[in-house]
Amino acid sequence: MNQWLLLAAAGFLAGAMNAMVGGGSFASFPALIAAGVPPVMANASSAVALYPGGLISSWVFRRGAGPIAGVSLALLSAVTAVGGLAGALLLLNTPGTTFDRLIPWLLLLATLALAFGRRLDLSQVTAGISRWGIVAGQFILGAYGGYFGGAAGIMMVAFWTFAAGCEAKAVQAQRTLLVVAANSAAVLFFSATSIVRWDTVLILAPAALAGGYCGALVGLRLRPLHVRIATVTIAAGVTLLFFLRAYA
């Protein structure tokens, strides 16, 4: 019973975090590990559980999305989905012991993206990457989303800003839709295998939806800086615990 309460609380917190700033997997993933789910299975189950919330968000943002640096959203969505599938395939072929060693570094990367990704103004140092360079970069980001996914949306925005000088506020709809594109491919693949612990998903998913609704309401009343500080603090704490778990 305590295990199910832990998962429900983690799902609620994950949904609230995703609604306010992102990084919900920092709550759901360690809760699954604490419940005794193996790391690779925990990562896949977390992705499936948090997927409905992202799908709803993409529906809300669907009308505000357009091309990025002249690359159509349809092409970017297709490339991101293929990348997501490639990432999911790579995850299922990663030995559990290897993934255990990778987890802290993936969490650290996501924590740094949460902490600094939205504050970086890269538009002044635009690289002017070509159209096909943007497509290739999007494939890599899609693969990261399918493999692990923490803060993938923030990484996408940072990449578009650097590659093509996009304004962060102008590509939020694209960010939401393309994260869902990567997750859709990965979730469909995970669901067709035996890697998902559906008993945990049935606890996490509705709790995450409830948390997302409440998080959106609370987020309207809190200062963005306070929300970001709280999220980054949680992410940093989880990252430290996984470094200790893997290397201490």
Image: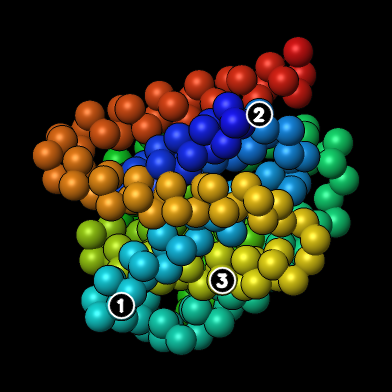
Up the image or down, 195 lies above or below 66; here it is above
Residue at point 76%, 19% (across, down)? 247
Label 2 close to label 3 by CB (< 8 Å): no
Q: CA distance from mark 2 to mark 1?
A: 36 Å
Q: CA distance from mark 2 to mark 3?
A: 26 Å
Q: Disc 1 designates what residue?
A: 62
Provide residue 53's location: percent of width, then percent of height.
Answer: 41, 60
10 Å neighbourhood of mark 2: few (<14), some, or many (≥20)? Answer: some
The disc at residue 18 is none
Q: Is residue 238 left or right of residue 234?
A: right
Under mark 1, the amino acid is Arg
Is tag 2's residue or tag 1's residue first in the polypeptide sequence?
2
Under mark 2, the amino acid is Ala
Is tag 2's residue or tag 3's residue first in the polypeptide sequence?
2
Provide residue 181's location: percent of width, then percent of height.
Answer: 51, 72
Q: CA distance from mark 1 to mark 3?
A: 15 Å
Q: Secondary structure at mark 2?
A: helix
Provide residue 23's location: percent of width, then percent of height.
Answer: 45, 43
Under mark 3, the amino acid is Ser
Q: Nearer the viewer, mark 2 or mark 3?
A: 2
Q: Disc 3 designates what residue?
A: 184
Provide residue 233's location: percent of width, then percent of height.
Answer: 40, 24
- Residue 30 image-quadrant placement: top right
The disc at residue 34 is 2
